[in-house]
Image: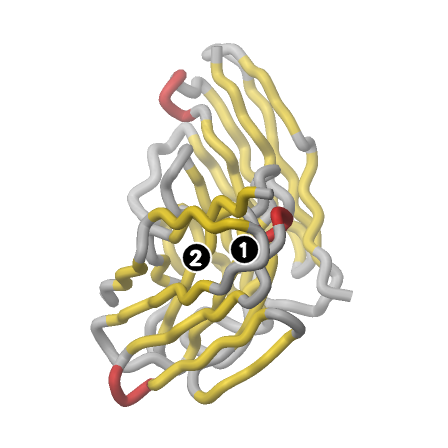
Amino acid sequence: GIQVEQSPPDLILQEGANSTLRCNFSDSVNNLQWFHQNPWGQLINLFYIPSGTKQNGRLSATTVATERYSLLYISSSQTTDSGVYFCAVSRYNFNKFYFGSGTKLNVKP
Amino acid sequence: DTEVTQTPKHLVMGMTNKKSLKCEQHMGHRAMYWYKQKAKKPPELMFVYSYEKLSINESVPSRFSPECPNSSLLNLHLHALQPEDSALYLCASSQRLAGSSYEQYFGPGTRLTVT
């Protein structure tokens, strides 16, 4: 399988601060997604980003596939950004996704 | 529309009960997944269906029985569960299997408590 490591495991921010979450993976991938799991358990798609850079409002993500890592940037954090952020990857001939252990983010007002 | 629906939202069942979880998507996706998630852990894959056929069973105990009656529906039949089976059960779908370049979408989950 593919090993996926996320860092940091826990992050506490003051509202308005910026943060960077990291996802390292052990093999080449052609599928990489970032999810936000809210306190009610819903996993929300943030980015599909097997390579390159994307931006969506205050969030952006970059994947450097050749170096096997992806970064999720959160700017001007809000309390609604709290929750757990997961990275999930897969590759050709692998019929399942491999999840990292997540980064738990707590944004304080 | 990128919606996956799951029913029920909450379920409490005794160890001798039989119950079913239901998952539905109308995005034309041909791969569907069941995951189990315990508190403070990532989702753990249980089953994968591709074109209504079981593709992966991650050595799940037989008290969990999946069924894919058509391309839009996925069921998980539960029988003689144990208290340690209490968890959030998540359904997901993607246009094709995970190794292809398609996003996976999750339903809101069923929070199961076994008493």
Q: Position of residue B62 (x, y in %)?
A: 37, 32
Residue B4: name its quadrant: bottom right
Residue B115: image location, x then y, percent: 48, 10
- Amino acid type, mark 2: Phe
The residue shown at (35%, 85%) is A64
Tell me, what colour scheme is on the image? secondary structure
Up the image or down, B17 lies above or below B5; here it is: above
Quarter of the image where one finds residue B12: top right
Report the residue marked by disc 2.
Answer: A86
Residue drawn at 43 percent across, 20 percent down: B81
Residue A75 picture location, percent across and down: 55, 67
Chain for numbered disc 1: A
Q: Residues within 10 Å of mark 2 (few under 14, many from 20)?
A: many
B69 vs B17, left or right, is right
Q: Which residue is mark 1?
A: A36
Look at the numbered disc 2 and give the secondary structure of its residue: strand
- Residue at 59% of width from left, 80% of height from top? A55
Could you tell me if the residues under marks 1 and 2 are in contact, i.e. CB atoms within 8 Å?
yes
